[in-house]
Image (cartoon, rainbow, N blue to C red):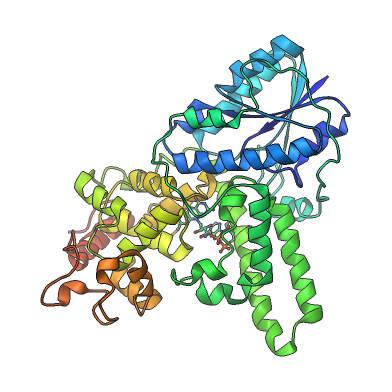
């Protein structure tokens, strides 16, 4: 019987359960990626993601060819592609990972499940992440303990490929470029692919991690000490399990080799990275449990209080709000496709709580810009940062204070706002205090907006309505 490997957000060959189980049958395997308009045009994905996906697919296509395989792609809805495969080959077995996404992927998986059932085909899904599903699922913590012990799977030495496939499928990956998705085709620094992902991980363990905690909040130096592994985890170019096991291995190695005076410090850096890898799945779990996280507020009392303001939104997107540190962060993100956590939180809270724009709109702007956009993490973070998660406080970062703390000399600002390069660190964060402001006039009165909106949001949180 034909075995089908359906790639989704798991574009790699190493430690890939679906590939392992399909190849282990000894049958012919069809490897495919389907670019579904219902997913790619749902609104949260952008050209940047499609480019990263295409690069990732090119990489595994090369690797598959070396072991006798071929990767096919198509643009279309899954059920229609499955129809074509069924017409040519009859019943087949499909292997894929569990996708933990928002409603469009959740609904698509239900449709595919129905199709498979109606055609008496078997679909096996494998857990790529320590995230649980279903009423009778074990507790996530217990599942994690077992999941992390599972064997890491090698790339198969040889696979048996098909000689003919339905016309709808092609091995010409450039067809993906014809799919209409929002956003401009901008060159960004981060390139997709399994080999790239492995190189990022290697660089982190060899050199970058040593200043991980110290630099993570400072955007000028964060790229040299953060892993920037997020796009590779998001698109599955690297397996989370193998990365978590690599952290354990490096911790052991450190114990054996580090100078005792440095050991505690270096161990702390790895521990902090390890904790974040674990947080990742707890965030994804919340979206698995509530796939409407991108649309519905966890606390509905906050619905309807935020406004649409195209002018403010446009200035925010372009990094032209008049607040140098905030603008530098947005411009950097738009150009490079990545920014560190602290500044993501600042960008989100400024858009949602200071400008009081709809958190879904701000969330989409940031999703389009983050190469690592992962619905599982992103929408939960957006709800947290906009203060509508009932279990948390309402964050309201002061963008001037943040700039002074995390970019005291204005080096990051100067990198992205050349017109401020001549200013010294006393003026660069508040250029409007100079006799002639060499920069854009701020689009809002920061203190006033923060005070007003704090009152409004906390009023709702405490009393269900705004305070007088
Ligand atoms: C508003 C907002 C939106 C975000 N959206 C995304 C997103 O779409 N995709 C995404 O991968 N991360 C998102 N994050 C979390 C975090 O900012 C990024 O994971 C991190 O900055 C990526 O850089 P890194 O790979 O160098 O991280 P590192 O610091 O090296 O951490 C290693 C890995 O741990 C995970 N991780 C780190 N921090 C967090 C966190 N706070 N929450 C959950 N997982 C974490 C990521 O997978 C990351 O790659 C968001 C944060 C905020 C505030």
Quarter of the picture holding the C terminus: bottom left
Image height check: is 286 above or below 418?
above
To which quarter of the image does residue 185 belong? top left
Residue 194 in sight here: yes
Mark count: 0
Q: Nearer the viewer, residue 204 or 450?
A: 204
Residue 384 in sight here: no
Residue pushed farthest right? 26
Q: Nearer the viewer, residue 214 or 126?
A: 214
What x and y, as percent, mark residue 48?
47, 43
Residue pushed farthest top? 87
To which quarter of the image does residue 466 belong? bottom left
Quarter of the picture holding the N terminus: top right
Residue lying at 65% horizontally and 18% vertically, measured from the top left: 82
Residue pushed farthest left? 435
Residue lying at 26% horizontally and 71% vertically, measured from the top left: 420
Residue lying at 62% horizontally and 51% vertically, measured from the top left: 233
Residue lying at 21% horizontally and 65% vertically, measured from the top left: 446
What x and y, as percent, mark residue 201?
66, 60
Image height check: is 444 above or below 271?
above
Query: Left or right of 78: which side holds 51?
Result: left
Image height check: is 248 above or below 15?
below
To which quarter of the image does residue 159 belong? top right
What x and y, as percent, mark residue 78?
60, 22
What x and y, as percent, mark residue 223?
51, 66
């Amino acid at each position: 019987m034909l075995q089908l490997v359906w790639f989704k957000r798991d574009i790699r060959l190493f430690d890939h359960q679906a590939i392992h189980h399909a190849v282990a049958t000894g049958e012919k395997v069809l490897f495919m990626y389907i670019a579904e308009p219902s997913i790619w045009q749902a609104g949260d994905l952008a050209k940047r993601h499609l480019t990263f996906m295409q690069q990732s697919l090119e990489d595994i296509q090369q690797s598959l060819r070396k072991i006798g395989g071929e990767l096919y792609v198509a643009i279309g809805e899954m059920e229609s592609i499955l129809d074509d495969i069924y017409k040519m080959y009859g019943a087949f077995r499909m292997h894929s990972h569990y996708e933990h996404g928002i409603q469009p992927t959740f609904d698509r998986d239900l449709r595919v499940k129905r199709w498979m059932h109606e055609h008496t085909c078997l679909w096996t899904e494998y857990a790529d992440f320590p995230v649980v599903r279903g009423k009778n699922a074990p507790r996530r913590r217990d599942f994690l303990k077992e999941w992390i012990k599972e064997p890491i799977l090698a790339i198969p030495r040889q696979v048996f490929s098909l000689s003919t496939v339905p016309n709808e499928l092609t091995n010409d990956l450039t067809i993906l470029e014809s799919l209409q998705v929002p956003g401009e085709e901008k060159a960004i620094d981060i390139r997709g692919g399994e080999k790239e992902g492995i190189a990022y991980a290697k660089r982190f363990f060899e050199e970058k991690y040593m200043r991980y905690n110290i630099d993570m909040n400072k955007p000028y130096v964060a790229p040299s000490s953060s892993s920037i592994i997020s796009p590779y985890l998001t698109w599955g170019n690297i397996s989370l399990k193998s990365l978590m096991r690599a952290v354990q291995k490096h911790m052991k190695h450190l114990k054996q080799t580090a100078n005792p005076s440095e050991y505690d410090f270096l161990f702390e850096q790895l521990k902090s990275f390890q904790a974040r890898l674990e947080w990742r799945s707890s965030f994804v779990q919340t979206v698995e449990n509530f796939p409407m996280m991108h649309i519905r507020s966890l606390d509905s009392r906050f619905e309807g209080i935020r406004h649409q303001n195209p002018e403010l939104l446009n200035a925010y997107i372009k990094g032209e709000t008049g607040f140098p540190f905030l603008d530098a962060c947005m411009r950097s993100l738009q150009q490079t496709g990545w920014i560190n956590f602290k500044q993501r939180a600042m960008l989100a809270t400024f858009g949602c709580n200071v400008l009081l724009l709809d958190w879904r709109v701000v969330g989409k702007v940031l999703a389009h810009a983050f190469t690592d956009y992962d619905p599982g993490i992103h929408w939960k973070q957006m709800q947290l940062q906009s203060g509508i998660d009932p279990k948390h406080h309402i964050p309201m970062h002061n963008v001037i204070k943040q700039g002074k703390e995390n970019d005291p000399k204005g080096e990051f600002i100067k990198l992205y706002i050349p017109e401020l390069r001549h200013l010294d660190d006393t003026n660069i964060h508040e250029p409007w205090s100079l006799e002639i402001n060499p920069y854009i006039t701020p689009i809002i009165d920061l203190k006033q907006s923060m005070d007003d909106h704090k009152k409004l949001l906390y009023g709702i949180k405490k009393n269900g309505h705004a305070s007088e």
